[in-house]
Amino acid sequence: MSFNLLNIANSGIRANSELLQTTSKNISNVNTEGYVRERTEFTTMIDNQVGRGQTYRLLNEFAQKQLNRDTSNKSFFDQFVSEASRVDTLFSEESNSLSTSVNSFFNNIQESLNQPSSSVARSLVMTDAQSLIEQMDRLSGIVIDQQSVVNEQLEIFSDEANNLIQNISTLNNKIAAVDGTSQESGSSSLYNERDKAIRDLSALIDIETLDGPNGSKQIYMGTGEALVMENGTFNLFSLTGDPDPNFKELKLDVQGGKAVPLEVDPSKLKGKIGGLLAFRDDILVPAKNQIGQMGLALADAFNQQNRLGMDANGEIGGDIFMIPDTPAFAYQANTGNSAMTATLEPGKGSELPASDFVVTYTSPTTVEIQAIDNKGKPIGTASTADVVAGVIDSSTITPSGGESFGLELTVSGTANTGDQFMVKLNSQASTNLELATNRPEDLALASPIRTANDIANTSDAAITAGTVSDASNFGSPLSLPNGSITISKTAEPDEYTVSDGVNSTTFNGTPPLNNVLATAGGGFENYGFDFDIEGTPALGDTFTVEANESGFDDNRNGQLLADIQNSNIVRRNVEGSSGNNHQTFNQSYTGLVSDIGVVTHQAQTSGAAFTALAEQSEAWYESLSGVNLDEEAANLLRFQQSYAASAQVLSTARAIFDTLLNAAR
C-alpha cells in the first residue's frame, strides 16, 4: 500500500509542478506582445495515478483570423485618415485658397476697366496674375510634398512586409522540424512569434491564412496572390515606376525576380500600404490634376481673349501666361527611339479634362489617345490620330468625330507599333505655369476696332460695337486687313454694299442685319471680326468700321477678360455633353476642396466603425488567448495547495514505509 501511495504522491507532485510552471509562465508573460496563454492538462491512468501532462496554447483560430481582417481594415483607414486630414486642413486654409487669389485678380481687372489707360491699374492686374501663379504653385507643392512622403512610406512599409514574409517562412521551417515530436509542446514560442508576425503583416496588407503540412501556415493576399507557400518558398514586394519613376507601383516579385512580377491591384488592398495607395490615388492624383487643369484652362482662356484686344502700345495683344511644354513618359517596354512632348493646343483649354492620357502607337504614323482615371483605368472612348510632320493635335484626329482632349503632342525619333507614352500634362503643368510677360502695357483692354454711324444718316439704325474672333489679319501698326470698311444701303428695299480699300460686295438682307460681314461674303467673312446693324437703315445710310487707333480709354476687350471669371471654361468629366460638362474656375476649385473634405469625412466615419470592430475582435481573441492575472492567481493558489497535499501524501507514504521496515527488522 505504501508503494502505491508513494507512486500516487510522486505523480501528483510532478503534475502540480508542471501546472505551476505553466501558470508561472503565463503570469511572467502577461505583458509580452503576441503571447498566447497556455494550459496543461492530464489524463487519469491506472491506480488513479496522474498520466503525462500535455501543454497547449489556448487559441480560437476563427477569432484570430477575424482579428487579422479587422486589423487590416482599421490600419487602412487609420493611415488614410492620417494622410488625408493633413491635406484637407491645408486646402481648407484661407491662406492657401485659389479662389481668394483668382477673385483678387479679376477684381483688379474690374478696377482697370474704370481707368483703361492707367499704368498703375494695369500693374496691379499683372501683380495679381503673378500672385495667382505662385499660389497655384504653392498648392501644387503641398500635393507634391505629400506624394514624396507617400513614396518614402511605401518603401518603408514594403521593406517591413518583406521582412515579415521572410520571417514567417523561416518560422514555418522551424515549426515543421518539431511538429509531431516531443519537442512540439516546448516550442510554443515559435508559434507565438509566427502569429505575431502574421498579425503585424495584416496591419500592412490584408491577408488570408491556410493551414499547410507539418504545422506550417500558407499566407495569401486578400486579392489571392501567394506570399508564403509550402517548402519555405515565398514572394516579396517590389516598387517600380513605369513609366513615371516618381509614381511608385506595388508589384509582387515572384521568385526573387526570376519571373515576371505580378501586378497588384491597389484598389483592393487594405492595411497601411493600401491606405497609402488609396490616399495617393483618391486625393493626391485628382488634386494635382485638377489644379493643373484649372490653371491651364484659365491661362488659355485669358491668352485667347487678350489676343483679340489692343494693348497700351496700340498693338494686337499677345499671351499673358506661358503654357508649358512637358515631356511624356516612355514605357520601359518601348522598342522604338521616339520621344514625345505635350502641351495645350491654343484655344483648347476648355477641352482638357482633369486626367492623364496613354498614347499608343497603332502604327509608326498613327496613335490612339486614351484618357485614364486616377487608378490608370481607361475612361471613355479612345481617339485616333495621324502623326503629321511630327505633330498630333485636333487637326490630325481621325475620323473627324474624335477629339484631341486639347492636347498638342510633338514627337521625334521613330516609334514602333505598340510603343506607349503616358502624358501627364495637368500634373506637370500645375507647377510650371509662368507669366509670358510682366509688362502692364501688354494687357489688351481695348478692342482693335471701332464702329460709327455716319452723321448724315437719316434713320435711327445703329451699328453695334462689333466683336473680334480672330486678330491675325490685323496689321502692325494697328490697321484693318484692307483699310476702313464702309457699309451703305444702296437700293430699296434691302440692298447693301460693303467695301474697303480693296474689296467690294453687294448683298441683300432684311433688317435688323446680324453678322453683316458673314452675310456679305466676298472674303469679308474671313476678316476675323463682325458686327450687327440694329433697326432699319434708310436709303443712303452709311456705317463705318475702322482700326481703333489711339483708343486707349476703350475697355471693351477688358470687359470680356473680366467675364472669364464667370465663364464655364473648366471641363468636368471626360465623358458628357458639352452643354453641361463645364464649370467656372471657382466652381471647379470649390468642388475640389469639397471632394477632399467629403472623402476625408467618409474615411473618418468608416475608420471609427472599423476601430470598433477591431476592438471587439481583440476582446473576443483575448478572452481565450489573453492572460487574466486574476484567473492565474487563483490557479496558482489552487495548484500550490494541490502540490502541498501531494507532498503530504508523499510524507505519509514514507512514514508507513519506514514503519514497515522497522517492524521487519
Image: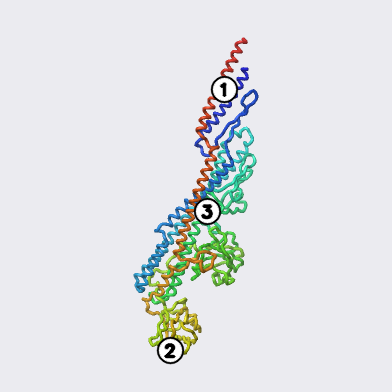
Is 403 placed left or right of 586 in the picture? right
Residue 408 appears anywhere in the view? no
Residue 554 picture location, percent across and down: 38, 76
Could you say which is closer to the camera, residue 387 or residue 74? 74
Q: Tell which circle, 3 or 2, labels the residue nearer the N-terminal end.
A: 3
**Disc 3, disc 1: CB below 8 Å?**
no
Q: Residues within 10 Å of mark 3 (few under 14, many from 20)?
A: many
Q: Nearer the viewer, residue 208 or 480?
A: 208
Image-based side of 462 in relation to 165, left or right: left
Q: Which quadrant of the structure image shows residue 100?
A: bottom left
**Residue under numbered circle 1:** 646
- Image coordinates of residue 506 in percent, x first then y, are 49, 87
- Mark 3 touches mark 2? (CB < 8 Å): no
Quadrant where the image shows the N terminus: top right
Q: Nearer the viewer, mark 3 or mark 2?
A: 2
**Outermost residue, top side:** 665
Residue in the image at 57% along x and 45% along y:
165
Judging by the rendered image, the residue that carries numbered circle 3 is: 277
Q: Which element type, helix, strand or loop, lies under badge 1?
A: helix
> Of tags 2 and 1, which is closer to the observer?
2
Percent from the top left, x then y, of residue 426?
Answer: 49, 63
Does residue 404 lie above or below 455 as drawn?
above
Q: Label 2, label 1: how many angstroms apart (C-alpha)? A: 135 Å
User: Element at badge 3?
Assistant: helix
For disc 2, the marked residue is 540
The Cα–Cα distance between marks 3 and 2, rounded to whole angstroms, is: 74 Å
Q: Earlier in the sequence, mark 2 or mark 1?
A: 2
Label 3 sits on what residue type? Leu
Q: Amino acid at mark 2?
A: Gly
Vertical placement of residue 195 versus 25, above or below: below
